[in-house]
Image: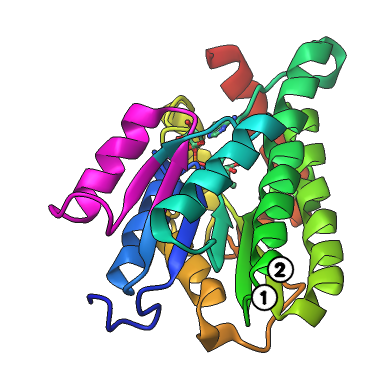
Amino acid sequence: MGSAGRLGGVVALVTGGGSGIGRAVCVRLARDGARVAVADRDGGWAGEVREGLSPTPPPLHAAFAVDVASQDSVDAMVARVQDHFGTPPSICVTCAGVTRDEFLLRLPHNHFDEVLSVNLKGTFLVTQAVARAMVAVGAARGSIVHVGSIVGKVGNVGQANYAASKSGVEGLMRSCAKELGRFGIRCNAVLPGFIRTPMTARVPSKVIGKFAALVPMGRLGQPEEVADVCAFLASEDSAYITGASVEVTALLRERLTSQPNHLIGSLTDCSRAT
Ligand code: NAD
């Protein structure tokens, strides 16, 4: 689909666009006709994704290096996106995220701070900068999609920092939805389960098998399956949805809730194996 797609030429900013789910979101939004700003801490990865979106050099799509945990970096990136496209993004999908897994009793404080800085404060900084830019130009509508995690709802052994950050993302999203609705800006979240990406590639195959066995469909998710939901929430197909969290877990959430001991076993295995 070209610019005639359902996102017909709108500018979409994707943080964490250089890998995994963010990369799949860039591809999906471009396919729907959006002009995509691929933003990532790794500018090289962002550039590769941009090249993959279209053989045409910028200005159709563009890549930007950013550290979402830094306000200066985020503000500069949003200004460069606006300069490049001549308009602020009207779609923003925040995929940048990190894990620093460890059991609570051994969790170093700097690993707690680092995960909160990128996953939660980074989401706040990007959302604030983008929303300010949208409001400043009097944009008629906008859609912000936060990538949270099902772990933010159910918790996870070895992920106190990550779970706290992702719970925070949901609270942030709901508050943003309430504040930004009057400007025509919607804010929603997707909560993925266990998705095959570089983030989860370090998990031993034995543990992957245990997680897959918890899913009635018997497999983990693909980044494209999360991207499809992000694209729906980004588009006007979801025009009357705001403040919502959409779980993309294929029922993994229910199984994690009903079989917590199974999960503990898996993660203990994981922790020993890595
Ligand atoms: P990934 O590691 O493949 O991609 C994360 C991207 O974020 C990378 O390109 C990385 O460079 C970028 N990034 C990290 N820190 C950054 C920073 N400070 N500034 C800018 N960019 C930064 O991981 P993924 O699995 O694709 O994860 C994407 C999002 O989905 C994350 O928020 C993650 O927490 C969430 N998520 C993933 C899963 C899963 O199973 N893979 C499940 C639930 C939620």
**Labels 1 & 2 near each other (Cβ < 8 A):** yes
Say left or right for 111 vs 6.
right
Residue at 45% of width from left, 24% of height from top? 202
Which of the colour schemes (rainbow, by chain, secondary structure, one colour) is used? Answer: rainbow
* Residue 167 sits inside the magenta stretch: no
Residue 220 in sight: no
Residue 56 in sight: yes
In the picture, which quadrant includes the N terminus? bottom left
Q: Residues within 10 Å of mark 1 (few under 14, many from 20)?
A: few
Secondary structure at badge 2 equals helix
Q: CA distance from mark 1 to mark 2?
A: 5 Å
**Amino acid type assigned to the residue bearing label 1 in the image:** Gly
| Magenta-colored span | 37-63
Q: Image height check: is 35 above or below 241?
A: above
Residue at the disc numbered 2: 135
Residue at 65% of width from left, 59% of height from top? 133
Query: Residue 248 or 41: which is nearer the viewer?
Result: 41
Question: Disc number at residue 57?
Answer: none
Query: Residue 246 or 173: which is nearer the viewer?
Result: 173
Q: Residues within 10 Å of mark 2 (few under 14, many from 20)?
A: some
Secondary structure at badge 1 equals loop
Q: Image height check: is 32 above or below 222?
A: below
Query: Residue 138 or 177: which is nearer the viewer?
Result: 138
Residue 214: where, in percent of width, then height?
A: 57, 52
Question: Disc number at residue 138?
Answer: 1
